[in-house]
Structures are given as structure tokens and as C-alpha cells.
Image: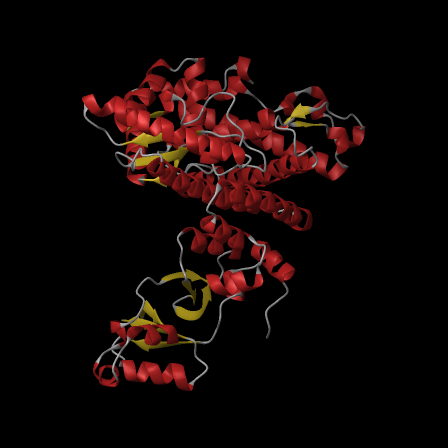
Amino acid sequence: MGLKPAYENKLLAFTGVVGNLAHNKIKTININCSLDEASRLLINTSINYLVILKKNIPVGIVTKQHFSNSNLKDSDTKSEFVSKIMDTHLISVQKNEPVFETLMFMLKHNINHLLVMDGKQSLGIITQKDWLSVQVNYPTQLIKKIREADSIAKIVTIRKESKKIIWDIFIKEENAVSLTNIITIVNDAIGKRIQELALAEMVTKGKGDAPVNYAWIGMGSEGRKAQTIRTDQDNGIIFENVAADEYNKVKDWFLEFSAIVVNGLNECGFPLCRGNIMATNPNLCNSIDKWKELFEFIITKAARKELLEASIYFDFRCIYGKEELVNELWTYLFESIKKHNFFMRHFSENLLEASRPPIRKWKWRMPTNFNIIPPPFDIKREGTAPLDAAIRLLALHNEIRETNTLKRLQAILEKGNMPKSLADNVHVAFDFILKLRFKLEFTMDTEILTIDHTVNPKDLIPIELRKLKDALKTIYELQDYAFKEVTGMNIPWSMK
């Protein structure tokens, strides 16, 4: 069977499982097999890959290329075992794993060979090279181009190309969740490459390498891996602690470095944050201890401004650099929340005060067949934001470090702290609301930086309006559930 056309493979990425892509020309052999026998298997058969087993567990892989690169003598092949040249970096997945998530995992971690399993049996191998060969313009090729880009100008061109691809896929498939996954992978790759270029520029300018290890963090929608095609920046820098007399010098280096990165991101189509939630803000470019002090202040004061900051900052994740710094900050955050338990009460109240879906207003409550159309509403402020906020609240309550809303939801469900029926409805609501946001953004002028998130229900067909009402009702129920779960109290009448 030949390779499928590129478009069919694009659809497969959204609808298929990885078992459909795996090569079946593999053979399993014991780790005590001689190199001579392994070589004959590869040369004299149609087998392309040998999966090495130890106690029936895959522990490595050998290909013809391994023999070519080994410079072995003939005598060695008879006396040595296959374990001498096998690649031990073998990761396996089950055949029913989604194609898209699997391929993006390979790309993110730079995995060349992935073993596909059917239960405990080896089914086949999938490689980055195979996927790239049929996907000239698909995200895998985009990532390759980004990693090889030697200037901001080239990255700008690649990002424009990525927008066209995302639009094309959305029109054909309309899978909003998968699209955000693509956008996250592409945007993260852009962010990492800009970091590398900025580090090189600092050296060229005579400023030297980074004085200490650091982590570049994404917050807000970037932290949640929920960026749409037009999202501004929310970032910061955590660097290692230094002696007091070195602090200002080190911080100045990182502020200058941050300016290069932030400007580079802006050139690539990530607008500057109007709220100044960026690493160029001295308050967000600090040592790990200073970040702990900032989080402690937010949690202990817990006023309106601080609660707004918490809703942005507490979605932080590592984009580039030393992830241990991010993990340390998460540990401190949970410890601080435990110590000041009133914070979660205030955060819960803020959840309901900040924004409620409009579903309780009378025009929204009327049956669709009454021909009473609800008024326009802000889908981000009254849809996406309250859903994300409720899941964030529950994630903090359950000490979940994951920042993506759907992964947080899954983790909460796995802990047994949400009814499955509600979790299923939230997943459906999230996907539908996100789909409407994509439609809205794709219909706007690409040169407009300020996005209008207003959705007019009269522009929706009846089935879309019904789904929208169901989604908003689910978000309302989720908010109520989160408040009760965290505070142990019923919803105050004034907040219903």
C-alpha cells in the first residue's frame, strides 16, 4: 500500500489513531542475540527494524543504519551481542493513541523512533522522517523550519505560513481543540528559537552568556496552552538566586535580554501585552525568591487587583530554560495557599463576581422555538474566561500543576473530585466555545490587533444556538460546583 495523499493524512491527524500509521516491517529479538544474527535478519529480509526485548519488554531498537555507523569488524559481529549497538532511547505508545498528540509528542521531545504496541505485542514503528515525507506544509515541517531559522525575519515568514495552514485545516475539519494544540506547538517552537537567537545576540553585543540559569515562563492563555491565532504576550523570567551585591547586575542582564525576546515576539505577530504582563516588567523578571515573595503578597492580600493577577500568573509554565525553577515555584505556591486558606475563599468569590455566563437572563432562557434571540455577548469574558477560571480554582484546590484547562479537567476527574457527567459536559462546552472563537477570529481583518470577542446569536443557525445555550448552562453549573467544592458553602443569593 502506498502513502496516502497529504490531505488524507491531515484528516488522519485529527480522526485517526497511531496504529494506522505504524510500519509493520519489524521483528522482535532477544537482547542476547548476536550482532551477526541481527545483521543477517536486516540484510536478508524485508525487515527494517529490530525491536530488542529483555524479559519480553522492549528496551531498544536496531536498524541497518546502526550497523553502518558502528564500524564493527567481522569478528565483532560474531562475539558481541546486539545490545552493543542498539538505540536504548525507545519510547512506546499503544496503537489507539490519537495520531496528532503522538506526533506532537515526538516533535516536542525530538524522538526519532516510536514503538507502537498492541497490548504487550510490538505492532510497528513510526518515525518523524516518515511523517515529514508526506507533510510538506504540516506542523512538523513548520517546526523543522523554525528550528533552523537564523533570523527573526525568517520566523516572521514561517508564522505567516502557519496561519494559512491553520486556517486551511480549520475550514476542512473544525477541530478547535486540536488546532490549539498545533498553535501551542508552533508558538512554543517560535518562542524557544527566539530565546536562542537572543542569547546569541547578547554574546555578540559583548554582554556574555546568561549569568545564571533561568526559566522563561508563559502565563495566561500561553500558560494554559490555549492561544488562538491572535493572542498577546504574557511572559516572565525566573532566574536562580544570586548574592545580594550581584543581584542588580544579574537582573539588568536579564531585562536587556528580555527586551530582545519580547521585541522579537512582537515582530513575529505576538503583540505587546497592554497590561505589561511581560518579562520586560521589572516585577516579572526576578529571582526565584523574589517570585515567591510576589506570590506570597498576592495570596495574603487577595484584593481585587491581586486576584486578577492570580488569574493570570497562576497558569504559569516553562517555555524555555530550567524547568526545576518552575517546579520549585509551584511547590511554594501550594504551600502558601495551604498556609493562607482564606485565599481560596476570596478566589472562589472572585470566580462568581468577575463574570457569569448570561444564560440566566430571560432572553437566554426562552426556548429556541419561541423566536426570541438573545442579545450579543462577549464570548471570551462570559464564556471562555469563567470556564478557565473555574477549572483553575479546582486545579489549585487539588494541587494540580498542569496548566492546560482540559488536562486540568482530566486530572480533577482522575482524582475523583468531579462527577463524570459534569466533566463530559464541560469538555463539550469547551470545544464548542473555542470553535466559535476561532470562527470569530478567522472572519476578522488580520491587521486588526484589538480583537472584538462579541458573538451575536442571531448570526447562528438554530442548532448552533442550542449548543451555545447548553455550553453556557454547563459553564454556569461548573462555576457553582467549583465554588461549593472549594468553600463547602452554598452560592450566596447575590451571586446566583
Q: Where is residue 98 drawn, in percent x and y?
A: 51, 56
Left or right, 395 with reference to 442: left
In this orientation, does residue 338 appear?
A: no
| Pick the front one: 12 or 49 | 49
Q: Where is residue 53 drawn, in percent x and y?
A: 31, 72
Left or right, 242 with reference to 40: left
Q: On the image, which quarter does residue 357 sit in?
A: top right
Q: Give the residue at x 44% y 38%.
A: 408
Q: Where is residue 294 drawn, in percent x and y?
A: 33, 20
Q: Which image quarter holds the C terminus? A: top right
In this orientation, does residue 450 appear?
A: yes
- The mark total stands at 0
| Pick the front one: 308 or 468 | 308
* Rendering colour mode: secondary structure
Q: Give the residue at x 24% y 85%.
A: 78
| Pick the front one: 309 or 87 | 87
Left or right, 142 with reference to 216: right
Q: Which image quarter holds the N terminus? A: bottom right
Above-or-below relation of 327 to 49:
above
Above-or-below relation of 182 to 2:
above
Q: Give the residue at x 52% y 65%.
A: 21
Q: Where is residue 316 drawn, in percent x and y?
A: 40, 32
Q: On the image, which quarter does residue 342 sit in?
A: top left
Q: On the image, which quarter does residue 89 sit in?
A: bottom left
| Pick the front one: 471 or 43 | 43
